[in-house]
Image (tube, helix red, strand yellow):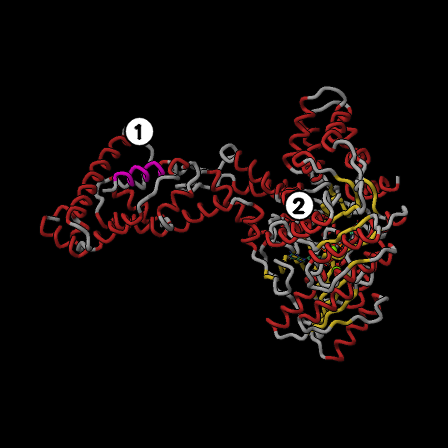
């Protein structure tokens, strides 16, 4: 329930109880005006014009309690919760990818902490050799989580870092390798190719890897997230999303469009800046927070 | 010689008729599209609503210029209002104190540390300043190291103090700068949420202690609907002096720039366009407006028509056309107008609703030849083409470097055109035709 409280706290602060009002309003039946209020609610939560339209259409057409129709439409859009997978043959490899500043390095640290706590043998790999002090940052997270960090120096070839990390994991019986990569805008072809190269190196060493390629998305961003997901997915094949910074007041409604259009599920959420501020995504809680 | 051209042009210009005034009815579709576009650009919903209401009521009743539709003109009006709103006076930095303090604030990961270093580099290079960077983010892992590395790469000193007490670091940094003769002090702070009371108090206190000339809030251009709330709260608590919008090197539409300006009234002073430290740019309201609105082709069509169709000349020409007094001087004038609008084909391409012309190539050489021929006529000949006899034709051909038959064809076309004009005139009197101000025939 900790997450729900986090989400709820955020909601109350910005919306002045607006969601609550909207929901109680439609309880009595739908009118055009009420639908407009719902649309406003959705748009302000970054659901985006198209998906909002889709949801409103559903509400217009489908019979039954409008609150339930709305809730079920959102739940249907998000689908069944999916969890992080593990490789049958160790090591399991996760790569974290995404645009600049979304929370990749922080999430890598949190993941390392979580699985270390669960008794797994974990290493972190510093495959961001570009951003100033990215390696030092990951090393600090390694310290917090109590796991080793495989790193080269700044400017080093990131393929080589990934290679070393996976190789090390194979020969030392490591269960999980978490690879932090540099932030890159999806519009930069050369940087996207670099990411593809990392993946090629990994899959050569250990087929079917990485087990998870997670797009780290900042919940405060808007419709650009859809394009990010599309391009990263095309480039390296995403298996899931980590939605960070949900401890703020942003709702992250753009994940509805991403799931609807690309079928990529959110697997984790970030709710703060310390090691334990990572949760499995829970559709029901997310939807309830959206509609509270 | 240019039958095809005539056909194409008359078809194109048929579409370009003035339609009176802007009414709620005739811009309904444009209004819907503009709203959708702004929402897709992540402009805050409430801002979209308010802004569009204002613009619409202002635009109602405005005369639609000839050659564009009310929808097109409306889009142009929205664009102008956007530029107006995003613009404003104080875009530069106001660094009056010595040393002058610049405080960087904002949400996590927006780009504060990078912009701090970029600004230091900018001030050093462009204004000959002697900046000091201050690493006052004591929370994020390796934030201090990050700034140290960036400072080193641009040869700007970085003050780190005791690396623990953000108030002490800030105070000492100002003293340090005074002592060392640094005239600008750029203070990097930790990323924070506007609802994090403790952290908001921290940055308020840092601002109190350092009395900055500039408090710049750094906004990620990818920001969604909610970030304007953060901007409003940071402004309420700190009275920020402006924004820096980052990561515009991507394909985000950057609606947050509009929302933040609209809600706080504070200007956007710089934009970040890359990870490298020289990738900082001054803010151009017009570029930002067109990026957010995303309807650049319609806007530039209207602009071109507005700018380049010299209204008076066109009206005069229309009068002459109607009186069938059309001479080669007029013809030349028309050619000039077309040329001013860029190439003929680019003009055609820009006209919405002319898709079938897309794959027809307009022979622009032909226009050049026609112009050459007309240029070789004497003043008298141009004003009074009736006098062009065989020997004059020969002279014109020689002078223009075209063949005699080309000259003859042009004159023949001219005569046809004159006949056509007479017919148009008659038809119009009977009310069968709209206005044809721009006919070649
Ligand atoms: N409030 C909050 N802040 C977060 C969360 N996740 C990350 N952050 C903060 O966001 C900022 C950026 O996080 P990083 O992990 O450095 O992001 P990154 O994607 O690795 O950034 P680059 O490597 O520069 O592209 C840091 O200040 C983090 O502390 C979260 O869930 N909540
Ligand atoms: N492509 C691009 N990346 C940028 C731009 N500005 C900053 N970045 C990147 O965005 C990420 C975050 O930048 P930082 O300067 O660390 O952001 P910050 O606001 O200091 O982050 P915190 O201190 O964690 O809150 C880094 O990867 C930067 O390289 C920009 O204009 N374009
Ligand atoms: Mg990182
Ligand atoms: Mg920083």
Q: Is the residue marked by circle 1 packed among few (<14), some (14-19), or many (20+) residues within 10 Å?
A: few
Residue B149 in which image quadrant = bottom right
- Residue B11 on the magenta span: yes
Q: Residue furthest front?
A: A171
Query: Which x, y percent locates residue B432?
Result: 30, 28
Q: Secondary structure at mark 1?
A: loop
Q: What residue lies at 78% left-to-right and 76% top-to-bottom?
A: B176
Pick the front one: B433 or B45: B45
Report which residue position mark 1 lands on: B431
Q: Nearer the viewer, residue A58 or B25?
A: A58
In the displayed structure, would residue B418 be above or below residue B170? above
Mark 2: secondary structure: helix
Q: Which residues are magenta?
A: B3-13
- Give the dominant element type of the magenta stretch: helix, strand or loop: helix
Identify whether B179 is placed above or below B291.
Answer: below
Q: Is mark 1 within 8 Å of ligand 2?
A: no
The reply to whether residue A213 is visible in this rendering is: no
Chain at numbered mark 2: A
Question: Residue B297: which disc?
Answer: none
Q: Residue at x 36, y 36 (%)?
A: B14
Name the residue located 38 percent from the left edge and 39 percent from the top edge: B359
In the image: residue B404, left or right of residue B312: left
Say which of B141 and A288 sits in front.
B141
Give the chain of mark 1.
B
Query: Residue B330: x and y, percent?
Result: 25, 48
Residue tagged 2: A236
Left or right of B404, for residue B148:
right
User: If the image is split into quadrants, where does the C terminus of chain B sit?
Assistant: top left
């Amino acid at each position: 329930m900790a997450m729900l409280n986090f989400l709820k706290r955020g909601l109350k602060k910005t919306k002045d109880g607006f969601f609550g009002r909207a929901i109680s309003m439609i309880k009595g039946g739908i009118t055009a005006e009420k639908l407009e209020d719902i649309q406003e609610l959705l748009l302000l939560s970054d659901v985006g014009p198209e998906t909002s339209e889709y949801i409103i259409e559903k509400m217009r057409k489908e019979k039954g309690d409008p609150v339930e129709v709305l809730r079920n439409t959102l739940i249907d859009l998000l689908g069944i919760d999916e969890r992080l997978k593990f490789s049958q043959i160790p090591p399991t490899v996760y790569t974290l990818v995404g645009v600049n500043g979304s929370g990749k390095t922080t999430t890598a640290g949190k993941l390392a902490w979580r699985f270390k706590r669960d008794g797994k043998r974990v290493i972190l790999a510093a495959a961001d050799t570009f951003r100033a002090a990215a390696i030092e940052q990951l090393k600090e997270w390694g310290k917090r989580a109590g796991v080793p960090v495989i790193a080269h120096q700044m400017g080093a070839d990131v393929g080589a870092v990934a290679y070393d990390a996976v190789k090390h994991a194979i020969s030392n019986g490591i269960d999980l390798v978490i690879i932090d990569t540099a932030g890159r805008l999806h519009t930069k072809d050369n940087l996207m190719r670099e990411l593809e190269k990392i993946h090629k190196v990994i899959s050569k060493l250990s087929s079917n890897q990485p087990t998870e390629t997670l797009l780290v998305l900042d919940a405060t961003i808007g419709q650009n997230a859809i394009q990010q997901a599309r391009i990263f997915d095309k480039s390296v094949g995403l298996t899931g999303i980590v939605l960070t910074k949900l401890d703020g007041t942003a709702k992250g409604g753009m994940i509805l469009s991403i799931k609807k259009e690309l079928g990529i599920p959110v697997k984790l959420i970030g709710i703060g800046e310390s090691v334990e501020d990572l949760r499995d995504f829970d559709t029901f809680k997310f939807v309830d927070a959206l509609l509270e | 010689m240019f039958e095809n051209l005539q056909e194409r042009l008359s078809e194109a210009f048929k579409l370009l008729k003035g339609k009176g005034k802007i009414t709620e009815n005739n811009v309904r579709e444009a209004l819907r599209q503009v709203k959708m576009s702004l929402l897709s650009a992540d402009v805050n919903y409430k801002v979209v609503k308010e802004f569009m209401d204002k613009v619409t009521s202002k635009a109602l009743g405005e005369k639609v210029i000839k050659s564009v539709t009310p929808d097109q003109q409306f889009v142009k009006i929205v664009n102008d209002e956007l530029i107006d709103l995003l613009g404003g006076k104080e875009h530069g930095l106001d660094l009056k104190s010595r040393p002058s303090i610049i405080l960087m604030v904002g949400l996590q990961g927006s780009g504060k540390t990078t912009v701090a270093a970029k600004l230091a580099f900018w001030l050093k290079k462009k204004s000959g300043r002697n900046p000091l960077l201050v690493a006052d983010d004591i929370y994020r892992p390796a934030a201090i190291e990050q700034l140290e590395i960036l400072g080193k790469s641009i040869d700007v000193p970085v003050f780190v103090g005791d690396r623990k007490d953000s108030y002490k670091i800030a105070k000492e940094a100002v003293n340090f700068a005074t002592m060392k003769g640094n005239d600008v002090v750029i203070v990097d702070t930790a990323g924070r949420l506007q609802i994090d009371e403790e952290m908001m108090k921290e940055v308020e206190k840092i601002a109190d202690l350092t009395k900055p000339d500039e408090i710049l809030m750094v906004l990620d251009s990818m920001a969604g609907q909610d970030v304007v709330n953060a901007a409003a709260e940071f402004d309420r608590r700190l009275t920020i002096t402006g924004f820096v919008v980052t990561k515009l090197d991507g394909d985000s539409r950057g609606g947050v720039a509009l929302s933040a300006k609209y809600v706080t009234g504070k200007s956007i002073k710089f934009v970040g366009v890359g990870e490298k430290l020289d990738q900082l740019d001054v803010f151009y309201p017009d570029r930002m407006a067109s990026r957010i609105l995303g309807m650049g082709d319609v806007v530039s069509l209207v602009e071109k028509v507005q700018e380049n169709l010299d209204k008076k000349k066109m009206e005069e020409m229309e009068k002459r056309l109607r009186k069938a007094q059309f001479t080669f001087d007029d013809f030349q004038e028309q050619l000039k107008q077309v040329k001013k609008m860029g190439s003929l084909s680019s003009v055609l391409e820009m006209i919405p609703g002319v898709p079938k012309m897309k794959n027809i190539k307009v022979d622009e050489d032909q226009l050049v030849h026609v112009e050459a021929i007309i240029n070789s006529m004497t003043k008298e000949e141009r004003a009074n083409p009736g006098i062009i006899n065989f020997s004059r034709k020969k002279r014109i051909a020689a002078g223009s470097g075209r063949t005699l038959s080309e000259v003859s064809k042009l004159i023949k076309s001219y005569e046809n055109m004159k006949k056509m004009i007479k017919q148009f005139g008659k038809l119009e009197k009977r009310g069968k035709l709209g206005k044809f101000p721009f006919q070649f025939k």
